Amino acid sequence: MIISERIFKIMEEKGISQIEFARRTGISQSTVSDWKRKKTNPAADKIMCICNVLDVTPYEILQDSIERRNGVDYILLGEDDDAFELIEIYKSLDEKRKARLIGYADALRSIKK
């Protein structure tokens, strides 16, 4: 179950409509609707606000979205394993190469589409 599915399940259990949820969190109704329609997840910076409105802990929101791999807990954000692979590559590098990888990622981020 992805994070947004868990949020909607908790909303249903607590009898909170999407409109009420959007009003109380300050998150637009269209964004909340997109989570459901497009099966996407909220931004990480919204999790605490969501938890406060739903009166749950972050663990309750994330519990079905955590997978343990090689002794590390990963939050699953969908079916894409590229992030996990990138983390594994990073962990296998020496400090100098880790710094180069971070520099490369920063350069990629700054390139405008």
Image (spheres, grey):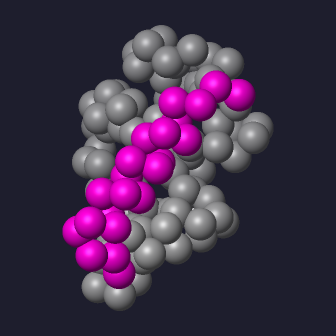
Q: Main secondary structure of the magenta part?
A: helix
Q: Is residue 110 magenta?
A: yes
Q: Quadrant of residue 111?
A: top right
Q: Position of residue 84 (x, y in %)?
A: 49, 70
> 56 or 102, which is in the foreground?
102
Q: Position of residue 72 (x, y in %)?
A: 30, 77
Residue at x 62% of width, y 59% of height: 78
Image quadrant for the N terminus?
bottom right
Question: Which residue is most to the right?
Answer: 37
**Residue 42 belongs to magenta span:** no
Question: Percent position (x, y) of residue 107?
Answer: 49, 39
Give the quarter of the image for residue 69.
Answer: bottom left
| Relative horizontal placement of residue 33, taking residue 76 as reference (left or right) | right
Q: Up-down: is 38 above or below 18? A: below
What residue appears at the point 41 percent right and 19 percent down from the top-left corner?
A: 25
Note whether 2 is above or below 70 in the view shown.
above
Judged left or right of residue 108, residue 66 is: left
Residue visible at 64% across and 37% down in the picture? 35
Q: Quadrant of residue 75?
A: bottom left
Could one spot residue 64 in this view of the protein?
no
Q: Is residue 16 above or below residue 79?
A: above
Left/right of residue 111 with respect to residue 59 in the rendered view:
right
Residue at image point 67% right, 18% down? 30
Looking at the rendered structure, the number of numbered marks drawn on it comes to: 0
User: Who is closer to the viewer here, 64 or 18?
Assistant: 64
- The answer, for residue 102, to whether it is visible in the render is yes
Residue 88 horizontal/vertical position (percent): 42, 76
| Residue 92 higher or lower than 46, as above or below | below
| Boundaries of the magenta span | 92-113
Task: Between residue 30 and residue 54, name the one nearer to us.
Answer: 30
Quarter of the image containing the C terminus? top right
